[in-house]
Image (tube, rainbow, N blue to C red):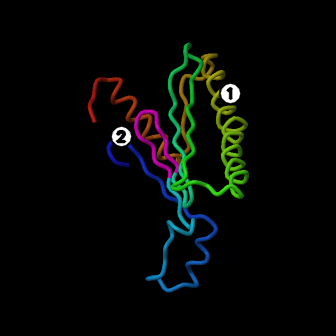
Amino acid sequence: SFGDHQRMGYPNHPIDVLAKQPREEWEPLKTGAISFIMHLFPNTIMALFYDHFEIFQILPGPTADTSITIQNFYTPAAVPEEDREEMLGRFQFVYNLLQAEDYWAIQQTQETLTTGANKMLVFGRMEIPLHQLHDSCAKHLAGGHA
């Protein structure tokens, strides 16, 4: 973490190729061996991949139980015509994944919390970024500064 912000790097399958190369020839960012997710407090997420990056901004909706997500998909250069359908398919895959998994789980969690049946929610031990986000929100709501 960097103050209220966070960065998480993780390996992808191309990382296996690096084991067969001399270390001085490694270019993990160019080959897709490593990707990064960055959370810029309070509401922006950047996902950096070898051939594109995505920016998500999550904004409050008109009611307490709604939000608005602005999802942007960027490439470092114009995508050749013959590759556009595949690249748009990747964008659509991420969009569908968020709708079917992340947003669905968030909606279910919010509905459960709204019932008041649980007075406390415990994050998993390995969800360190969620703990840090919770701590940052609590600090700012209490009037603390970064």
Residue found 56% across the figure and 64% down from its top: 11
**Label drawn at residue 130:** none
Q: Does the magenta run of residues contain 60?
A: no
Spot occupied by residue 24 in the image (x, y as percentages of width and height): 43, 83
Q: Quadrant of residue 83?
A: bottom right
Q: Main secondary structure of the magenta part?
A: strand
Label 1 crowding class (10 Å Cα cut-off): few <14, some 14-19, many 20+? few
Q: Where does the magenta region start and end?
A: 37-47
**Lower position in the chain sequence, tag 2 or tag 1:** 2
Q: Nearer the viewer, residue 75 or 14?
A: 75
Label 2 crowding class (10 Å Cα cut-off): few <14, some 14-19, many 20+? some
The span from disc 2 to disc 1 (Cα, nearest Å) is 27 Å
The type of residue carrying mark 1 is: Gln
**Label drawn at residue 4:** 2
Residue found 46% across the figure and 40% down from its top: 131
Image quadrant for the C terminus?
Answer: top left
Spot occupied by residue 120 in the image (x, y as percentages of width and height): 53, 27
Which residue does the numbered mark 1 point to in the structure image? 108
